Amino acid sequence: MSKVLRDASCPIGKQCPEIAKGPSGYEIVGTNIPDPRLPEHERRVVVPETMLPELGGLDIADFEAWLEERRRTPGDMLRIQTRGAYAVPSDDADFAGYLGDAPGPASEYREPFFQELRDDAAAGRVWRNLVVLDGPPTEYQRYANEWVYTYAVEAGQDVRILDLAEHPVARVLLRTGDFWVVEHQYVAVARYDEAGQHLGEVAVEDTSATGYIAAADLAWHLGTPFAAWHTAHPQYHRRHIAA
């Protein structure tokens, strides 16, 4: 027997959208949305936003504004990156050049980003970045190491590499995925599709944020400063692979 927690009226006057607590978990009834990607036993449904008002505040419509509302000066911001590749349009030309024979990065997007890092560093706004490696670096990660992080560190960003082969206890981060921790207090989870396209961020409620913050702190302490890690692994440098 299910206990109805919330319901709402349909246009025809019946109580059709419904959230109930059943013997196996929460049961949601709503308008069916055909989705051929789902397995036979699953369905996608839509329920009115008014039935889940507490979730409205978790959808971050403007992430840059969300960050600026929470960042402090001086302050701290940590990004955890767990994906092997990202589909970032501003990276496309440089990534292709890295895989080819381009002598170095040339994207117009680079200097504004590095200037932002320099300005933050000068103001005491610490910007940390932890990159999780699950096996040897992918082509995209090698590109990011040589043509992004090397310059970002020079501009004032604190970057560390966490190799799961050396610290398997941190493998839990592959389940949490990418997320941000701002001022050791606010957490936002970054969403991506299978191709690495960015789908936006979702805020984590205070009661759940503690676990993310603890995982980020542990991961950071296990990570190796980027310059030391990169110097110790010349086998992943482009010139070594090309030779």
Image: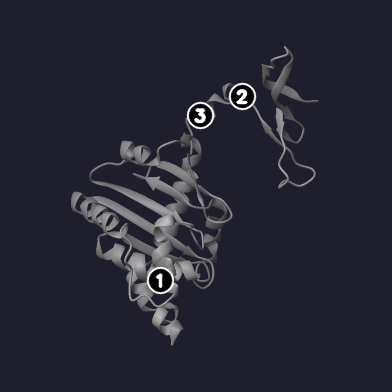
Q: Is residue 108 above or below residue 224?
A: above
Secondary structure of the residue carrying numbered label 2: loop
Query: Which residue bears the numbered disc 2?
Result: 48
Which residue, as the protein is rendered here, is positioned at the far bottom? 243
Identify the amino acid type marked 3: Gly
Which badge, 2 or 3, is on the more N-terminal residue?
A: 2
Quadrant in the rendering for residue 233: bottom left
Numbered label attached to residue 97: 1
Which badge, 3 or 1, is on the more N-terminal residue?
A: 3
- Judge depth for marks 2 and 1 and give the one in front: 1
Query: Which residue bears the numbered disc 3?
Result: 56
Pick the residue in front: 117 or 80.
Answer: 117
Location of the N terminus by quadrant is top right
Q: Position of residue 124 (x, y in %)?
A: 22, 50
* Disc 3 + disc 1, Cβ < 8 Å: no
Q: Residue at x 40, y 64 (%)?
A: 93
Describe residue 224's horizontal placement relative to residue 54 as left or right.
left
Identify the amino acid type marked 1: Gly
Q: Is residue 96 above or below residue 58?
A: below
Q: Residue at x 38, y 64 (%)?
A: 160
